[in-house]
Amino acid sequence: MTLQARVVGFAGALREQGVRIGPGETVDAAAVLEVLGMADRERLREGLAAALVRADGQREVFDAAFDLYFPAGVGAPESARNGDESDLEQRLVQALAGDDSGALGALAGEAVDALGQFGGSDGPQGWSAHQTLERLQPQTLLARVLAAMRGEAAEDFTDRLDRDEIRRRIDTFRERVRTEARRRSAELRGADHVAKHAIAPSADQVDFLNAGRDQLADLRRAVQPLARKLATRMAARRRRAARGTIDLRRTLRRSLSTGGVPLRPVYAHHRPARPEIVLLCDVSGSVAGFANFTMLLVQALHDQFSKVRVFAFVNRTDEVTRMIEPGAADPVELGRSILSEAAVTGWHDSSDYGNALAEFTDEYLDAVGPRTSVLVLGDARTNGWNPNLEALHTIKQRARHVFWLNPEPELRWSTGDSAARDYARIAEMHECRNTRRLSHLVSTLLPV
């Protein structure tokens, strides 16, 4: 692969993972490469990061792609060719105890070469980080590393700090193993293929329905920064809306003093009242994480609205506004509280949109008025129950807007027990699979 093709492929891989890179950024990357050269790999990494990384949460994606397109070496590392596998575990203990970055990198290469290869001549071949880590089990070495660091002294407060530090070092080693496995696999299958399938997306690109534990932790940390960013964006929209449109008649009258040239346009100013928001959220099963995150996000934006009321349901509906505290940022705890304290389930635990919508219109329809925008959050899967389209139509007749945010891909709408297409004929439905899409919808759909 030529150097030019490598830069273009690197930019394309980042673009595939949601990093916004166009021709201008690709040219900047080529200029950085020309100025810095290839002699100092870490210096080149930082230079390209400065040119290409524009948003929080993208650095991990950048580093993973950089290690594929600008690898530290080719083939098995020298230590793997000359090393002895029998004492790999003991050498890892010593490297972790001494926090020896160079030794940990070499040991990651040795571990992947010795333990991670799979396949044979008649089938797919490659190197697996999962297989390597399952065989090596570095997380089980904590006690041995601690003993190597502190001897046989009794456990005290500093020992607990040391344990946390050792866990951090082990996590760093595990990431080095993943990087090495991707590098070796890229030599067989090509960097483009591995980048597409083996690099984890940035937090704002992770599907709500597929998020793992670590990714959910990233989403929790993103609530408050994202809310501040959206608040700024919505405040700017409100200022533009307050400025109003050009008053043509007054503008032409003013232009008489400048020879008919409208140098100073006159605007028809208006001060619209801040809107009210009602959230109607499905908190059942796998969609609960999406609903809980969105509830916290909108609650964090409460200053942008005159009133925010939140209702949750599985097959019954209950108001949970009181349970969502401003500044809270733990969707998991919020979900547990709602399910344990709110009346959201009846005689079964499966979602029933029809019954939930009916209970909302019977008990809480007074929450919806001409200034209210209603956000329905859920996958519209009714488990075979009546979808009760009439209830949603009743809500729409009273509200200013009704928007439905669906975390499922649009291709799956109205498959199986989904009534998404039926609901979409009444409410404006949008696919909302990750935080990037959610922030776009919240900042553009909601009135100011």
Image (tube, grey):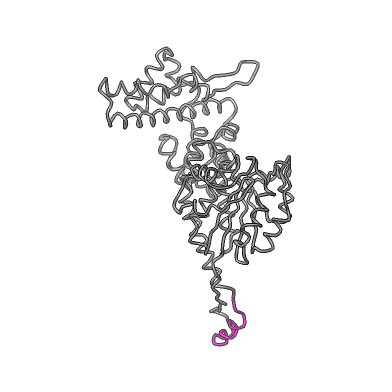
Read off the magenta span: 246-260
Q: Quadrant of the N terminus?
A: top right
Please state which of residues 134 and 404 is positioned toward the viewer in this rendering. 404
Residue 184 vertical position relative to residue 413 in the rendered view, above or below: above
Please state which of residues 102 and 60 is positioned toward the viewer in this rendering. 60
Please state which of residues 296 and 162 is positioned toward the viewer in this rendering. 296
Identify the image quadrant of residue 382.
top right
Please state which of residues 399 and 54 is positioned toward the viewer in this rendering. 399
User: Left or right of 347: which side holds 88?
Assistant: left
Residue 370 vertical position relative to residue 346 in the rendered view, above or below: below
Principal SS element in the magenta part? helix
Can residue 284 be found in the magenta stretch? no
Q: In percent of the image, x 43 and y 14: which residue is there?
A: 85
Residue 122 vertical position relative to residue 167 in the rendered view, above or below: above
Res 65 visible:
yes
| Image coordinates for residue 310, horizontal then vertical, percent | 56, 54
Residue 408 vertical position relative to residue 240 in the rendered view, above or below: above
Q: In percent of the image, x 55 and y 26: which residue is there?
A: 185
Can residue 247 be found in the magenta stretch? yes
| Image coordinates for residue 445, horizontal then vertical, percent | 60, 58
| Image coordinates for residue 129, horizontal then vertical, percent | 51, 25
**Residue, far left:** 153
Q: In percent of the image, x 45 and y 28: which residue is there?
A: 174
| Image coordinates for residue 162, horizontal then vertical, percent | 32, 30
Q: Quadrant of the C terminus?
A: bottom right
Number of marks drawn: 0
Res 20 visible:
no
